Image (cartoon, grey):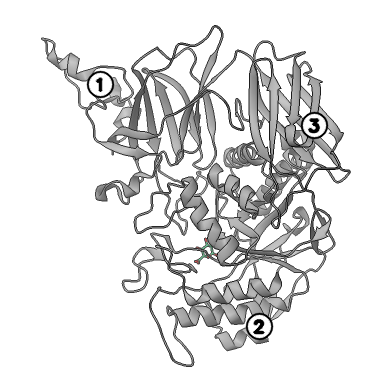
């Protein structure tokens, strides 16, 4: 297996997701808004028990006008009607929609009716789902058009032949059940949120269209990229690339595989993207009548010894970890642009940050675009969290697909610097093989970014160590450390701890943190846990301890904002929330916020 995963062929095989359209396109119909829904606790709409007549009476995806059927004479009847069902705002998790659904993790059917304008000859139509948690079964006008597994990556389904001019019936069965083979598994420390949590659009494209387009700056000062066409006429087509602000125009021709490549010197006037100056350019890729417009930044990224180099200069990452959950008392994982901006501005201006760890799964595309714009370097992770079914090849393939889907989705974001292949997975041979295969996949699909993983530390007396066999596969080491919160150390003990780490790579303290309930105070010299004062003291002592590690190049403490977690049931201090936020769930800053902001000001 090791020999197999080391081969480049394994790493890249068949992982390009079909029809993943990138960038802003001209002909896009937003299907956000009110969708109707029908709960299906026993999954009847997906199962055909004994082939009973119950199947047709209960199959929610059927294209039937039930009110009209009921008005007819006869004995037929139905036990659902999505046309007259209650409604829910999409995108958004169902958990916030009604109290009965707060902890529901089963199957719900959603329906959206829509009209389309008549297609021009040869035009093709696609549904693009940015994220459905966790499994999606998609039907258009009664016909199944596709399925997808994985809550945090997009998928695109062709529906050209399934559409009609008016009254289209899009029905999506969403199953939020996680199990031993899902990624993540059943137990996490966050709310698994079910539903159509990210936008759904209907995209119209010409018969042969731009499926994917990318461009990046290399260390040699060249702009290198490609455009992938999809369609019967994909070979031998002229493709153009234009960056008007730089006076750059280039042409290339697609090969037999429909791909055209660009490799040209970057203009001397190109201003590089950095957190201090997040320069973005309007980039236009065009082929035939199709065009994709992107806003992109250009920068280089490397590791040299223990340094992370951005545009050739060492950088220290001043950041924080963050979940995809908006501010407010009843979040629905509805990450609108203003919700993303509210959180990321707290990192950028509130904390004096230049970095954000988007944990523990690929966040909404909007988050990455806002990070690009504000100037925040991004760590993106796939949800291989705590434990998954390491020995199961189907699970590994699932993880590699998710990794590929996020790479193809995000590789045009200059902000994105680090791919994390997992979080806190206990060391064992099968687990290491699994992560190594993922790292090989990343290396093959996106050699321009750095690979990391949030690792567990070992403790021997007062010595903290990492001796993880995954290290040789990573460019950047990262550790989660909770001494002073979990375990028996007092805050006074932290100064005694010695860190014995390999020093040949940069280290990020990917997590450290302590719970505090906003507004809960303890004015004693040795404040107790759960108070804002304890959390602030924990930050002071932990930052002091970490500052002694010679190859420390980044910090992303846990976590920007209190977030919902079903594991957290202390009746006074938690009530379903993990309280390690520097902000309360509604955005109130705790004392530790200022401790970190001040530390980052001093590092700036
Ligand atoms: C961790 C996990 C994170 C948890 C956090 C905690 O190490 O990576 O997902 O939420 O600890 O609060 O315990």
In the image, farthest residue toward the top: 121
Question: In the image, residue 562 lies at what x, y percent?
Answer: 44, 64
Who's the residue at 45% across and 11% down the image? 118
Label 1: state its secondary structure: loop
| Camera-side residue of 520 and 384 | 520
Who's the residue at 62% across and 66% down the image? 352
- Whether 382 is drawn above or below 215: the answer is below
Quarter of the image with the C terminus is: bottom right
Pointer 2 or 1: first along the chain: 1
Which numbered disc covers residue 52? Answer: 1
Report the mark closest to the observer, 2 or 3. Answer: 3
- Which class describes the residues within 10 Å of circle 2: few (<14), some (14-19), or many (20+)? few
- Which class describes the residues within 10 Å of circle 3: few (<14), some (14-19), or many (20+)? few
Label 2: state its secondary structure: loop
Residue 584 placement: quadrant: bottom left
Pointer 2 or 3: first along the chain: 3
Q: Is residue 14 left or right of residue 570?
A: right
- Which class describes the residues within 10 Å of circle 1: few (<14), some (14-19), or many (20+)? few
Question: In the image, residue 286 lies at what x, y percent?
Answer: 69, 22
Who's the residue at 80% across and 69% down the image? 503
Contact, mark 3 vs mark 1 (Cβ under 8 Å): no
Rounded to the nearest angstrom, the CA distance separating label 2 from label 3 is 60 Å
Report the mark closest to the observer, 3 or 1. Answer: 3
Pointer 3 or 1: first along the chain: 1
Residue beneath disc 2: 461
Residue beneath disc 3: 248
Rounded to the nearest angstrom, the CA distance separating label 2 from label 1 is 65 Å
Residue 169 placement: quadrant: top left
């Amino acid at each position: 297996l090791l020999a197999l995963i080391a081969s480049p062929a394994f790493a890249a095989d068949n992982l390009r997701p079909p029809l993943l359209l990138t960038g802003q396109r001209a002909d896009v119909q937003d299907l956000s808004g009110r969708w109707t829904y029908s709960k299906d606790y026993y999954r009847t709409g997906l199962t055909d028990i004994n082939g009973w007549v119950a199947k047709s009476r209960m199959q929610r995806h059927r294209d039937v006008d039930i009110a009209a059927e009921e008005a007819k004479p006869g004995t037929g009847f139905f036990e659902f009607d999505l046309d007259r069902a209650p409604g829910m705002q999409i995108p958004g998790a169902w958990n916030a929609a009604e109290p009965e659904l707060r902890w529901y993790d089963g199957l719900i059917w959603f329906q959206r009716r829509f009209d389309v304008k008549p297609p021009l000859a040869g035009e093709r139509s696609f549904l693009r789902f940015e994220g459905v948690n966790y499994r999606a079964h998609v039907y258009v006008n009664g016909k199944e058009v596709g399925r997808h597994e994985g809550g945090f990556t997009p998928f695109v389904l062709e529906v050209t032949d399934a559409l009609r001019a008016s009254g289209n019936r899009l029905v999506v069965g969403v199953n939020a059940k996680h199990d031993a083979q899902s990624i993540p598994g059943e137990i996490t420390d966050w709310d698994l949120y079910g539903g159509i949590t990210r936008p759904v659009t209907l995209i119209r494209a010409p018969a042969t269209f731009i499926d994917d387009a990318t461009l990046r700056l290399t260390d040699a000062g060249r702009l290198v990229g490609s455009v992938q066409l999809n369609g019967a006429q994909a070979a031998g087509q002229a493709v153009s690339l234009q960056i008007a602000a730089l006076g750059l125009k280039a042409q290339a021709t697609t090969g037999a595989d429909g791909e055209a490549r660009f490799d040209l010197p970057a203009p001397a006037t190109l201003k590089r993207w950095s957190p201090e100056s997040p320069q973005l350019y309007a980039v236009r890729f065009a082929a035939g009548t199709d065009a994709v417009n992107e806003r992109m930044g250009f920068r280089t990224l490397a590791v040299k010894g223990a340094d992370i180099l951005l545009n050739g200069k060492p950088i220290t990452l001043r950041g924080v970890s963050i979940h995809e959950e908006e501010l407010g008392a009843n979040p629905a994982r509805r990450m609108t642009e203003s919700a993303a901006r509210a959180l990321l501005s707290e990192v950028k201006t509130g904390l004096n940050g230049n970095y954000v760890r988007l944990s523990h799964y690929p966040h909404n595309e909007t988050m990455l675009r806002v990070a690009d714009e504000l100037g925040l370097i991004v760590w993106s992770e796939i949800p291989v969290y705590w434990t998954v079914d390491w020995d199961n090849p189907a699970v590994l393939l699932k993880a590699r697909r998710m990794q590929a889907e996020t790479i193809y989705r995000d590789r045009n974001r200059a902000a994105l610097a680090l791919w994390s292949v997992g979080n806190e997975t206990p060391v064992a041979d099968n687990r290491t093989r699994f992560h190594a295969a993922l790292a090989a996949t990343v290396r093959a699909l996106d050699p321009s970014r750095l690979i990391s993983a949030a690792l567990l530390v070992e403790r021997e007396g007062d010595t903290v160590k990492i001796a993880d066999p995954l290290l040789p596969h990573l460019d950047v080491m990262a550790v989660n450390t909770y001494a002073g919160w979990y375990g028996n150390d007092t805050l006074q003990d932290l100064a005694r701890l010695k860190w014995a780490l390999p020093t040949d790579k940069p280290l990020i303290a990917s997590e450290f943190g302590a719970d505090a309930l906003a507004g809960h105070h303890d004015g004693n010299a040795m404040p107790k846990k759960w108070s804002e004062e304890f959390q602030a003291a924990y930050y002071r002592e932990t930052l002091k301890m970490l500052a002694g590690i010679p190859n420390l190049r980044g910090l992303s403490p846990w976590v920007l904002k209190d977030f919902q977690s079903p594991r957290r049931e202390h009746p006074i201090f938690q009530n379903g929330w993990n309280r390690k936020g520097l902000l309360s769930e509604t955005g109130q800053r705790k004392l530790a916020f200022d401790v970190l902001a001040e530390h980052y000001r001093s590092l700036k």
